[in-house]
């Protein structure tokens, strides 16, 4: 009997950690039985989720924090404006995003949800952060207009929720969406003086060029959008965009005598 009890506990723990289902039934003698397989006549046992919580020790900016165990966490799926540091002037809204995050998280307990990639090239952990009250901080930053959606495949967890929150914030002109710095500029307005940081650029797709590794949407002679072929699965038919006016969102780089923006997910594009 004791052996069966410990086996049941072990099964509950293993299936809870692996997110598998646990089934329970009672025999004619009133004894309870557990299994990870269903025979169609038993009930699924509903298990309470168990999480580990960590205290937020420091807030670096609007999308990066440090936990009490020393881990540096970069919030997945979003981007907030830069705050001022030695090599960077503050971008509009950067300090406000940081202030909100400090009030929401500093000294508070949070849990983490990871996606496909656990760390970035800076060795920061990539995660969605939830409070003890189950507030999804990544989504909340977007919903309130402190952050824009920034999807880096294969990290696609909560993408629909983030996009929905961004559409809501944009419609209400909340936060960054009410700043002139984040209004859409046409390709003709793009210059070396105003290309810094995250941009919204609009124009008509004149030609589409396909190479061995990439697809390029050329707007005008000196501006094009690049998409790696490995990311085409995250876009609809790009050929249909020829002759269409679209908006793209991301970081503009100077390449030779032209401007270039690389995008990785359809959330960075709007058909106007």
Image (cartoon, rainbow, N blue to C red):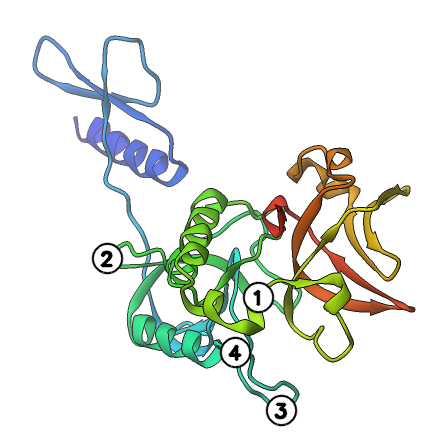
**Alpha-carbon span between mark 2 and mark 4:** 30 Å
Instruction: Pinpoint residue 73: horizontal percent, then vertical percent.
Output: 49, 67
Q: Is residue 112 something that shows in the picture?
A: no
Residue named by callout 3? 86
Tell me the mark number nearer the camera, choosing from 1 and 3: 1
Which residue is found at the position 54% from the left and 72% from the top?
180
Which residue is found at the position 51% from the left and 57% from the top?
76
Instruction: Pinpoint residue 72: horizontal percent, then vertical percent.
Output: 50, 71
Which residue is found at the position 63% from the left and 49% from the top?
269
Secondary structure, mark 1, is: loop
Residue named by callout 2? 133
The earlier-in-sequence mark between 1 and 3 is: 3
Secondary structure, mark 4, is: loop
Are the residues flagged by discs 2 and 3 in contact, CB closer than 8 Å? no
Image quadrant where residue 201 sits: bottom right
**Alpha-carbon span between mark 3 and mark 4:** 17 Å
Q: Is residue 12 something that shows in the picture?
A: yes
Q: Nearer the viewer, residue 136 or 242?
A: 242
| Quadrant of the rendering where the N terminus is positioned | top left
Secondary structure, mark 3, is: loop
The earlier-in-sequence mark between 2 and 1 is: 2
Residue named by callout 1? 183
Are the residues flagged by discs 2 and 4 in contact, CB closer than 8 Å? no
Mark number displayed over residue 92: 4
Secondary structure, mark 2, is: loop
Instruction: Pinpoint residue 59: horizontal percent, then vertical percent.
Output: 42, 77
Tell me the mark number nearer the camera, choosing from 2 and 3: 3
73 left or right of 244 in image: left
Image quadrant where residue 146 sits: bottom left
The earlier-in-sequence mark between 4 and 1 is: 4
Q: Is residue 250 above or below residue 96?
A: above
């Amino acid at each position: 009997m004791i052996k069966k009890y410990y086996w049941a506990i072990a099964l509950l723990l293993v299936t809870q950690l692996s997110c598998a289902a646990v089934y329970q039934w009672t025999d004619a003698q009133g004894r309870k039985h557990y299994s990870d397989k269903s025979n169609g006549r038993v009930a699924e046992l509903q298990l309470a989720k168990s999480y580990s919580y960590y205290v937020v020790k420091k807030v670096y900016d609007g999308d990066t924090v440090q936990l009490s165990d020393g881990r540096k966490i970069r919030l997945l799926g979003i981007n907030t404006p830069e705050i001022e540091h030695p090599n960077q002037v503050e971008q509009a809204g950067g300090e406000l995003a940081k202030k909100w995050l400090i009030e929401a998280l500093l000294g508070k307990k949070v849990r983490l949800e990871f996606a496909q990639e656990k760390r970035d090239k800076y060795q920061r952990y990539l995660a969605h952060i939830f409070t003890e009250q189950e507030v999804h901080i990544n989504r909340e930053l977007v919903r309130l207009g402190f952050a824009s959606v920034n999807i880096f495949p294969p990290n696609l967890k909560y993408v629909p929720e983030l996009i929905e929150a961004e559409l809501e914030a944009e419609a209400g002109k909340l936060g960054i969406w009410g700043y002139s710095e984040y209004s859409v500029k046409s390709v003709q307005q793009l210059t070396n003086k105003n290309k810094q940081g995250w941009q919204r650029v609009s124009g008509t797709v004149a030609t589409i060029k396909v190479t061995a590794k990439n697809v390029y949407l050329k707007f005008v002679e000196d501006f094009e959008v690049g998409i790696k072929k490995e990311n085409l699965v995250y876009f609809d038919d790009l050929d249909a965009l020829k002759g269409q006016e679209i908006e793209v969102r991301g970081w503009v780089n100077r390449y030779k005598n032209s401007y270039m923006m690389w995008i990785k997910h359809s959330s960075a594009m709007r058909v106007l």
